[in-house]
Amino acid sequence: MSSVISVENLSKKYIIGHQRPERYTALRDVLANGAKRAFGKLLHPNTGLDIAEQEEFWALSDISFEIKQGDRVGIIGRNGAGKSTLLKILSRITEPTSGRVAIKGRVASLLEVGTGFHPELTGRENIFLNGAILGMSKAEIRRKFDEIVSFAEVERFLDTPVKRYSSGMYVRLAFAVAAHLEPEILIVDEVLAVGDSAFQKKCTGKMDSISGEGRTVIFVSHNLVSVAMLCNRAILLERGTIVAEGRSEDVIDRYQFDSQEKLDVQGAQFNFKQDISTPAQISAIRIKKPDGKLAQVFDVSTEGIIEVDFILKQDFPTFLLSLHIWTANNALALASVDSDYMNYLNPTDMQGTFPRKAGTYTATIKIPAPLLNSGTYELEIFLTTGPARIDTQRGIFMEIRDNGSFLSFVSKAHRGGTLAVPLQWDIVGGPDGV
């Protein structure tokens, strides 16, 4: 397919502390600026420049890439890597310092809450305003209007000025407008994190359908599972330069390999605030290796241990702790409850109820190895009493890597599938006559 975005030797420089000249200067400004210059000369006597004019920051430095029609490209990297600056240049919000950007097609961008919205206008008026900005006729906008409103779920507030919307409502309407007014290129930043999990899934599904129609999606997110699920390609930025580009799975692996130490320390322990209104609550979750050290990245042959601290504020006649493990494609890889192993050991003596007294508990769940194939997995842990959930925690990730196990040794490449369990094979027979 032909390229819809071509970036050549793109750079963007900012002057840190640089102040734009004001339209007028008051006496207090003259005095303040004079004091600043005098103070700057004391600290930097060998230069005639003000302190505020001395430091350059290159948010992007000589990057080049191409995006083809229908590509779903994830832009990943740490905070300050240059992701948002790149999207602002692609969206024509800011100009590059040097380099060239060529874009073919109509671009819709959702970079921050309220992008393209006028706060004094109603939701209805902003839909038509955004459509006009994208070059659509009133007839085209009217044809999509009901679909936009239904997707955004803001029917009751359609004729309310958007300045009174919550951040979640703002994002829902902004995304609905950007996604439904048929842009050839849709650019979405981390702003979707403002919405609830149900709406995030809805947006991911919409972006997937957009790309299926041959349109192009550029997506920035720190949620690597979402990037792996949505994007077929990814670009990894670090300090304003491209350090990896290619299949999303490969680029995410590179990013996580580079960030393994950070992941192991910061992503393996979660503490949750107590809610006095709930009768039971998860208070902490830890992911560990067999030696007891916190970890988020595991080899396919290393056992994983999940510890869950939870509090019961009353007695429960039936109470269960459950674990779901989700793949990067949002498929359920494994479901388990705390009664599994007891029922497995005593299949003829399974209990119908599982009572538990009020108190503070720690559950330890062992994930045997080899079980899961290499990839990124999301853990969902929840408390239930009968059919009802009391507390649920998601957004906890494990990374499984194949660092030379029997899987890669035999297949010489990544073996597909979710499970890495070796199966026993018995083969009988042989050449005829033997």
Image (cartoon, helix red, strand yellow):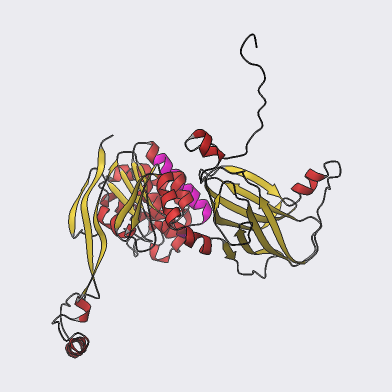
Please provide percent x and percent y for residue 380.
61, 53
Residue 348 vs residue 146, the one in the foreground: 348
Q: Which residue lies furthest to the top in this view?
A: 433
The residue depicted at 76 percent of the width and 56 percent of the height is 319
Considering the whole magenta stretch, tell me its main secondary structure.
helix
Q: Is residue 196 magenta?
A: yes
Residue 326 vs residue 129, the one in the foreground: 326
Q: Is residue 21 visible?
A: yes
> Based on the displayed image, in which of its 4 quarters is residue 309 positioned?
bottom right
Q: Residue furthest front?
A: 434
> Based on the displayed image, in which of its 4 quarters is residue 286 positioned?
bottom right
- Residue 411 to residue 197: above or below: above
Q: State left or right for residue 106 relative to residue 100.
A: right
Q: What stretch is highlighted in magenta?
A: 194-210
Please provide percent x and percent y for residue 268.
56, 61
- Residue 67 to residue 23: above or below: above
The residue depicted at 73 percent of the width and 52 percent of the height is 338
- Residue 204 to residue 57: above or below: above
Q: Locate the C terminus and report the quarter of the image it occupies.
A: top right
Please provide percent x and percent y for residue 297.
53, 54
> Based on the displayed image, in which of its 4 quarters is residue 106 positioned?
top left
Please provide percent x and percent y for residue 194.
46, 60
Q: Does the magenta stretch include residue 204?
A: yes
Q: State left or right for residue 360 relative to residue 167.
A: right
Q: Which residue lies furthest to the left in this view?
A: 48
Residue 118 vs residue 93, the one in the foreground: 93
The residue depicted at 39 percent of the width and 65 percent of the height is 163
Q: State left or right for residue 49 relative to residue 294.
A: left
Q: Is residue 416 visible?
A: no
Q: Locate the N terminus and report the quarter of the image it occupies.
A: top left
